[in-house]
Image: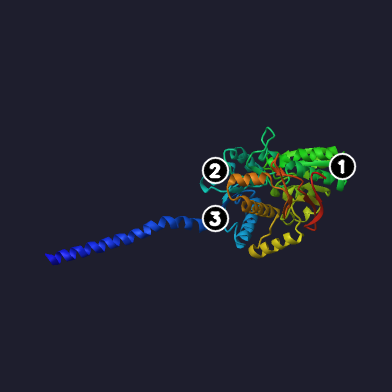
């Protein structure tokens, strides 16, 4: 009995010691946990990329996405933003408005992105703009139609920001250059009446050339499914047009330029951003003599260096949209480094952005319009199927 009692007491002592020993880490762990949280790195900074990757304007959307990714890779390779990596979450709009709206909603509600790099496609961005008022996530986009940035009452959508000159600015640049630098006086216009981009560039160009004493002798609209433009082009030529203004998407523009040459028109064609490379190669020798506007000139050393590196890595050419995506990712990195990744703080900083020197120019946002202010663009002429820089121009010149 005594032996049993001794064993029982020994067991109780062991259990008691074990219990005391196990309680010690529990007492220490609360004091250790805050220290671990303070020193542990935060998660990735998540940026949304909303682009047409497989739709009819995928040549534009892919380039924006690739440029943003290239910049993000550079940022991450240099240590990230305040020690945190940038993660891009890309959704394909498939050039479909509803698809884009669904993707936008997922980004803002599920992915919890800090900002969105938006598309250059006007129809998509115009559809997103009113919805963006419900959220506090800034959208840095490239759709030049005023309706993608400015409400009917003339005030800007609080979260929508344009990072290249607007349609009014681009139309004015092209019109002034055509009249003042090229000496052109009589213009014919051909445009896609169902495309917001094409329509948005129409009035600014007309108003500018007419204010400078030139004349629009005829204009012809067409539908998205049209492929034969010869009759329309003959109408412009018959009206006495010495130059044709064609602010249209690349695939349509190729047909328009080729058919203009086929009917014997050898004058100037004044075109928007869609005549940028790779248009000269896609169109062929008929593209010679086309004058177009661009965000960059490919001959500048820093741009040429990225073009060569991208070509070596991917086998593809980096076009102007690549550099738009690149610049806004760099802008976001600078802002997030300064104010953190809270979307509202980022939005406020974007609204007051001033003097950011990007590859596409010196970028300042006008807080009254949420559009760029005084940003120059570069006029080019296609010669021997290659772009030749003519002059830098801004709408304020």
Secondary element type, mark 1: loop
Compare marks 2 and 3 and give the one earlier in the sequence.
3
Q: Determine the CA span between mark 3 and mark 1.
A: 55 Å
Of labels 2 and 3, the one closer to you: 3
The residue sitting at 73% across, 42% down in the picture is 167
Q: Residue beneath label 1, please?
A: 185
Which residue corresponds to the image point at 60% horizontal and 51% vertical from the top-left? 53
State the SS at label 2. helix
Front residue of 173 and 229: 173
Q: Is residue 294 left or right of residue 56?
A: right
Give residue 184's position: percent from left, percent from top: 86, 44
Q: Please give the residue where the numbered disc 2 appears in the rendered image.
A: 105
Residue at the left extreme of this rendering: 1
Q: Nearer the viewer, residue 69 or 372?
A: 372
Marks 2 and 3, how far apart at CA: 20 Å
Sooner in the amino-acid sequence: mark 3 or mark 1:
3
First in sequence: mark 1 or mark 2? 2
The Cα atoms of the two marked residues, 1 and 2, are separated by 48 Å
Q: Is residue 263 visible?
A: no
Q: Looking at the picture, how far across and down is residue 310, in whole percent?
A: 66, 62
Q: Kindly identify which residue carries mark 3.
A: 44
Residue 193: image x %, image y %?
A: 70, 38
């Amino acid at each position: 009995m005594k032996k049993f009692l001794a064993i029982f007491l020994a067991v109780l002592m062991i259990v008691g010691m074990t219990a005391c020993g196990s309680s010690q880490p529990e007492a220490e762990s609360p004091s250790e946990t805050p220290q671990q949280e303070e020193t542990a790195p935060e998660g990735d900074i998540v940026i949304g990329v909303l682009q047409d990757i497989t739709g009819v304007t995928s040549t534009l959307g892919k380039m924006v996405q690739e440029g943003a990714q290239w910049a993000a890779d550079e940022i991450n390779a240099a240590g990230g933003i305040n020690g945190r990596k940038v993660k891009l979450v890309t959704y394909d709009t498939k050039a479909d408005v509803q698809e884009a709206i669904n993707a936008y909603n997922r980004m803002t509600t599920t992915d919890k992105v800090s900002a969105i790099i938006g598309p250059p496609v006007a129809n998509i961005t115009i559809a997103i703009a009113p919805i963006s008022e419900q959220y506090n996530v800034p959208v840095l986009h490239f759709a030049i139609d005023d309706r993608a940035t400015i409400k009917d009452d003339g005030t800007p959508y609080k979260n929508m920001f344009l990072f290249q000159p607007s349609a009014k600015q681009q139309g004015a640049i092209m019109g002034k250059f055509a009249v003042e630098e090229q000496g052109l006086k009589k213009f014919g216009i051909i445009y896609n009446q169902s495309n917001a981009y094409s329509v948005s560039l129409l009035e600014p160009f007309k108003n500018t050339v007419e204010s400078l004493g030139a004349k629009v002798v005829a204009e012809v609209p067409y539908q998205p499914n049209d492929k034969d433009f010869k009759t329309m082009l003959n109408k412009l030529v018959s009206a006495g047009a010495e130059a044709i203004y064609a602010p249209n998407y690349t695939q349509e523009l190729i047909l328009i330029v080729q058919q203009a040459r086929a009917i014997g028109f050898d004058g100037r064609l004044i075109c928007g951003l869609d005549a940028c490379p790779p248009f000269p190669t896609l169109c062929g020798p008929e593209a010679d003599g086309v004058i177009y506007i661009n965000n960059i000139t490919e001959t500048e050393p820093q741009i040429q260096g990225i073009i060569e590196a991208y070509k070596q890595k991917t086998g593809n050419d980096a076009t102007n949209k690549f550099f738009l995506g690149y610049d806004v990712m760099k802008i976001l990195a600078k802002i997030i480094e300064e104010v953190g990744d809270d979307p509202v703080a980022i939005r406020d900083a974007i609204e007051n952005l001033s003097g950011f020197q990007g590859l596409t120019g010196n970028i300042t946002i006008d807080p009254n319009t949420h559009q760029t202010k005084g940003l120059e663009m570069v006029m080019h002429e296609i010669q021997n199927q290659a772009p030749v820089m003519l002059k830098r121009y801004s709408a304020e010149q």
